Amino acid sequence: MLQLLPAEPGMPVDEIDTPSLVVDLDAFEFNLDTMARLAAAAGVRVRPHAKTHKSPVVAHLQMARGAVGQCVQKIAEAEVLAWGGVTNILVSNEVVSPRKLARLAALTRICTVAVCADSSRGVALIETAAKDADVRITVLVEIDVGAGRCGVAPGWKAVALARQIVDSPHLNFGGLQAYHGAAQHQRTPEQRAASIAAAARLTARVVEDLKHLGIECSIVGGAGTGTFELEAASGVYNELQVGSYVFMDADYGRNKPALPFQNALFVRATVMSAPHAGLAVIDAGHKAVAVDSGLPLVWQRPGITYVGASDEHGNLALAADAVPLRIGEHVMLVPGHCDPTVDRYDWYVGVRNGRVERMWPVAGRGAMS
Amino acid sequence: MLQLLPAEPGMPVDEIDTPSLVVDLDAFEFNLDTMARLAAAAGVRVRPHAKTHKSPVVAHLQMARGAVGQCVQKIAEAEVLAWGGVTNILVSNEVVSPRKLARLAALTRICTVAVCADSSRGVALIETAAKDADVRITVLVEIDVGAGRCGVAPGWKAVALARQIVDSPHLNFGGLQAYHGAAQHQRTPEQRAASIAAAARLTARVVEDLKHLGIECSIVGGAGTGTFELEAASGVYNELQVGSYVFMDADYGRNKPALPFQNALFVRATVMSAPHAGLAVIDAGHKAVAVDSGLPLVWQRPGITYVGASDEHGNLALAADAVPLRIGEHVMLVPGHCDPTVDRYDWYVGVRNGRVERMWPVAGRGAMS
């Protein structure tokens, strides 16, 4: 089902329907510019992760500022971007289903795509799909640099996998995927520095071993919003796969020191009940705002705390000195986690100076296959 | 974005794309029949909650077994049901936005609808919308019987609100909404019995007070899958608003004693990585399966546990004696919470005897406004 349009360009912010996904365009553009500037200064490429924004519109704004392409996690996301004119896409994830690999092979007809593998079986499946479609597919080896999720161990197994790719007639070897997801939300700079130093050391050794065999890594990719400055300075990584920086969220807001980005993404909600002085209930529960990384924050309303999410209700606790909330009044929430929150909406409502300036679709909402 | 069809009728179950939402039709029909039988035996009406299934198809299957109508939480859900031929809908929630109330008023042209209020301001807003559209709208008073969310206190305030509805020229008084959400997942029968006994006592008093004023409650509604037998036996409630029973989930599976329903809803996933003997990574993270009420369970795979959800990855831990998972192999997950999991998909894949028997759309997916 396509959600009803929650707003129209030109409308005052106060008239936007709820719950809805609102982007503060000044903050959003500040974030885009800041990342472009920091990456340029560090001399590394940016390949932002579209798993956050799921929008060719946002992708093109990032690439207009120098990003070399986009990352995605799913073939369906790659399709949405490719159909929206994005010409360079890395699936930073394993894909093993023949049907999905056939779709990936089809995409090579209209754009540059690459995919990751972390097993011999995975490489063989991609080779079969490429052969069947009579195309070449670029494959990166994913190595586990500490996240404990996907990825082959960064030693001889990684080298053997790269070798298998090089030797596959319908594959190109694209480099290494070396993302340390677990480091992104480590709260202190010391923890993050230690994690990424270790990841960079492990990655550098594989790059070196491959070089001795005459195999070049054109992409050495990783990094997220929590650690990108470390990967950028490592001398090992050449592409940053940052996603959340465009919007920020409450969970990244808990990293110390504060990240150089602004809160640009909000869920707008309406007070539908105020049973007593200490409680207001809004129309945004966890179907409207993701709670996997903690509850949302209430934006610029001192003494008001989002304390409980049910499916369609959010309970706000009001401290004794908080300005009361009236029935029908609106609040803005900073989501705990931006990526899955975006995935719940069909429309971004872009606002500036108190008005709706533009709207664009979350074209890849629900793109999971 | 409409998700690609994950399957086609007639296809063997093993060919269903992933991640996808699979309904075991035998278990689903068992659940429908069981609830119809239990409610009929207790002599109460069933008005199932469509917030769970979001589908006119499921609604009609429930009503073919005697359900009197449907509940929803959102106007957008009511629209999806009404447009799909459901003729009796209760919005079991407060609605205060004039735009939404105008949509509710429009729905009265094609079906019987009712909505809840828990404030004088809320009643006035509904009266205005009904007057503007030149229709009558039925309004129930929501009372707080222990959930601590919406609802006016079940005393003179509730009576005054009912009086205001009766006195509003464009409103009909429809009865009481008395749902005790917090009781549904209390784990022991003693806890739940105490909660619903208290809720029924409070509700009965309001019904009685209104009767003295000559105001009849045609609906006294509440109950969920965790407590419905208690409300059914109370002699106070006359409509059960059960939702999750059609599908069940891991969280309701933790209630003691076991509920008389079967697991009918699954998320099907594919192993995309198996980095070492103790770990398999599947393509269903928390964008594919809701984790607000706990992680999913792995269905009928002893020794395999879903231990971590990131956006697009699920980590499965394998005990030493578990049958290993191979890359490309499929698993079925029992979602922690069925309602928000359903809300992530466009398609139900109904299976029986190892084959896809039918598919139907999650027509109200994302219907939040």
Image (cartoon, coloured by chain):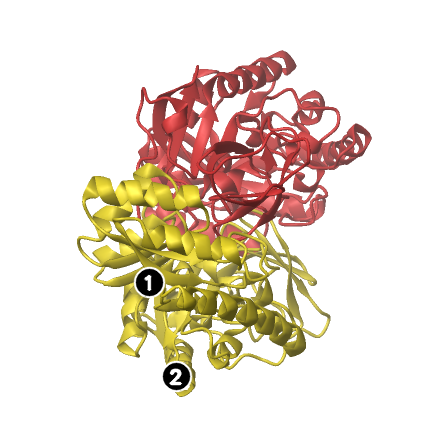
Chain colours: A red, B yellow
Q: Please, is residue B165 above or below residue B195 in the view?
A: above
Residue A214, how many percent across, how many down?
62, 32
B172, A21: nearer the viewer: B172
Q: Position of residue B71 (x, y in %)?
A: 37, 62
Picture layout, residue B356 above or below residue A100: below
Marks 2 and 1, how far apart at CA = 40 Å
Amino acid at pointer 2 = Gly
Which mark's residue is nearer the viewer, 2 or 1? 2
Q: Residue B271 sits in which quadrant?
A: bottom right
Residue at numbered disc 2: B43
Residue at image point 21% right, 47% down = B106
Q: Secondary structure at mark 2?
A: loop
For mark 1, what is the residue?
A: B7
Q: Chain of mark 2?
A: B
Determine the residue positioned at 63% across, 47% down. A151
Q: Nearer the viewer, residue A121 or A46?
A: A46
Amino acid at dot 1? Ala
Q: Are marks 2 and 1 on the same chain?
A: yes
Between disc 2 and disc 1, whose residue precedes? 1
**Residue B352 visible in this rendered orientation of the protein:** yes
Report the side of B29 relative to A33 (left or right).
left
Question: What chain does badge 1 belong to?
Answer: B
At x 70% / y 43%, what residue is drawn? A154
Residue B307 image position (x, y, % from top left): 66, 59
Residue B203 position within the rendered picture, expressed as x and y whole percent measured from the top left: 50, 67
Tally of marks? 2
The answer to which of B192 and A135 lies nearer the viewer is B192
A237 or A297: which is nearer to us? A297
Q: Residues within 10 Å of mark 2 (few under 14, many from 20)?
A: some
10 Å crowding of disc 1: few (<14), some (14-19), many (20+): many
